[in-house]
């Protein structure tokens, strides 16, 4: 329960300095300054602050985005960001008040999904967000690795260009690709500024971004200087690699692997990135997985029909959702030909789960069969969890390439 002394409201222009300070202090950092690209991306009519009297002690915002869901469809989703509580004011219900305000607002406006990146893994499940809705993998590999003999690399020239020349081309490629990749997000002008912010403070000791264009894709990376008296051993830190064709993907990876003066490549990418199967010695590619997007079903009856499904199913789900009580109860999910209908029912439940588990499975990232083994899903009618697991899976692991 939130402290009764607390209040919450949408921020105004005069609140921005305090909003930045509270957010920075919550994350143990420094305020970003008035010229921050992040500040320009903030949707102020969807940014809230919590007050204890006149003192601002909590921050939270929502960005209006779309996410690609299974079936190559785009669904509206609130991208929850900058949720923070000022040190000394925690465990008073500040985050609960922020979450309730955001989710109830999305429900009233008809926004069926919410999503976030969690700073800590123990916070957001209690608000109904499901972990591992998408996964991310840090791949680290040495350069000079040969490809499998079946991998063809074209002789297409890849050009390193300026940021100004690259950005219009990159936007066009991204627009072609994001709507085909489950978990990728729509971008507006300010999104590009935030994702590719390139001030000195953003670089963490690395170089500025390098922009390289292929006729069917692009790659953006930084360089970390490294080496010893025997020679240079620089590290390439890839920020984005976006391709409209599989050929461009092979060409751009080969371009990175053959980079002179470089010894290794690091890249946060999809768990099922095909580079593992392209190189001749996959054991040289180190892969470390982590959770990425956490998904929240705001409205079951609006959200589940947004995507397509891999197989037919007819199951009654009993859902627990104490934070958004309109979701609680029994729902019949019927899928025919990939299309879903969802309706309330009084029939006996085949499966019971909480709303966070349903969010984890929504994009096909977490398997309901695994969540059953984790005591997060209960099967009442034999066979229904396995049937639902198959129905929710897609042809690729969902992946979100950007933090917001």
Image: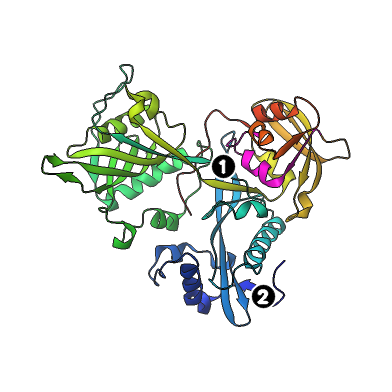
Q: Distance between the residues labelled 2 and 1?
A: 32 Å
Residue 364 drawn in magenta:
yes
Please name whichever residue, 195 or 2, is drawn nearer the observer in this view of the structure: 2
For the point 63% across and 82% down, which residue is it? Answer: 53
Sequence-first tag of 2 and 1: 2
SS at mark 1 in the image: loop
Residue 25 drawn in magenta:
no
For the point 67% across and 33% down, which residue is it? Answer: 373
Which image quadrant is residue 192 in? Answer: bottom left
Which image quadrant is residue 109 in? Answer: bottom right
Which image quadrant is residue 284 in? Answer: top left
Q: x, y percentage for residue 278?
A: 36, 24
Which residue is under mark 2?
Answer: 6
SS at mark 2 in the image: strand
Say left or right for 150 vs 88: left
The segment highlighted magenta reads 350-368
- Residue 59 shows in the view: yes
Which residue is under mark 1?
Answer: 132
Task: Please tell me how crowded label 1 is: few (under 14), some (14-19), or many (20+) other residues with Cα within 10 Å.
Answer: many
Please name whichever residue, 306 or 390, is drawn nearer the observer in this view of the structure: 390
């Amino acid at each position: 329960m939130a402290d009764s002394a607390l209040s919450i409201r949408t921020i105004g222009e005069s609140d921005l300095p305090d909003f930045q300070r509270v957010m920075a202090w919550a994350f143990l950092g420094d305020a970003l300054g008035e010229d921050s690209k992040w500040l320009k991306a903030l949707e102020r009519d969807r940014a809230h602050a919590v007050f204890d009297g006149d003192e601002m002690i909590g921050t939270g915002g929502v960005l209006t985005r779309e996410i690609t869901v299974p079936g190559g469809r785009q669904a509206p989703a609130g991208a929850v960001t900058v949720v923070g509580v000022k040190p000394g004011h925690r465990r008073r219900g500040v985050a609960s008040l922020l979450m309730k305000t955001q989710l109830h607002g999305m429900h009233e406006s008809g926004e069926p999904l919410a999503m976030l990146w969690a700073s800590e893994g123990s916070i957001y499940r209690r608000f109904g967000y499901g972990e591992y809705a998408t996964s991310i993998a840090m791949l680290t590999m040495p350069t000079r690795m040969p490809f499998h003999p079946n991998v063809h690399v074209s002789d297409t020239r890849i050009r390193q260009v300026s940021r100004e020349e690259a950005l219009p081309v990159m936007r066009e490629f991204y627009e072609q690709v994001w709507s085909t990749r489950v978990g990728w997000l729509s971008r507006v002008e300010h999104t590009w500024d935030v994702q590719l912010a390139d001030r000195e403070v953003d670089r963490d000791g690395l170089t500025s971004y390098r922009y390289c264009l292929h006729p069917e894709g692009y790659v953006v990376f930084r360089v970390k200087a490294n080496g010893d008296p025997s020679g240079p051993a620089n590290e390439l830190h890839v920020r984005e690699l976006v391709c409209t064709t599989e050929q461009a993907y092979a060409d751009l990876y080969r371009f990175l692997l053959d980079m002179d003066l470089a010894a290794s490549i690091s890249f946060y990418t999809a768990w099922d990135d095909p580079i593992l199967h392209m190189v001749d010695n996959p054991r040289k590619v180190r892969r470390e997985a982590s959770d990425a997007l956490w998904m929240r079903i705001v409205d079951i009856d609006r959200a589940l029909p947004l995507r397509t499904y891999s197989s037919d199913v007819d199951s009654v789900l009993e859902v627990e959702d104490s934070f958004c009580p309109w979701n609680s109860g029994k729902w019949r999910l019927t899928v025919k030909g990939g299309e879903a209908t969802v309706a309330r029912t009084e029939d006996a439940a085949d499966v019971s789960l909480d709303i966070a588990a349903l969010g984890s499975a929504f994009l096909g990232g977490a398997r309901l069969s695994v969540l059953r083994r984790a005591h997060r899903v209960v099967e009442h009618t034999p066979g229904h969890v396995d049937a639902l697991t198959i129905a929710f899976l897609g042809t690729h692991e969902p992946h979100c390439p950007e933090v917001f």
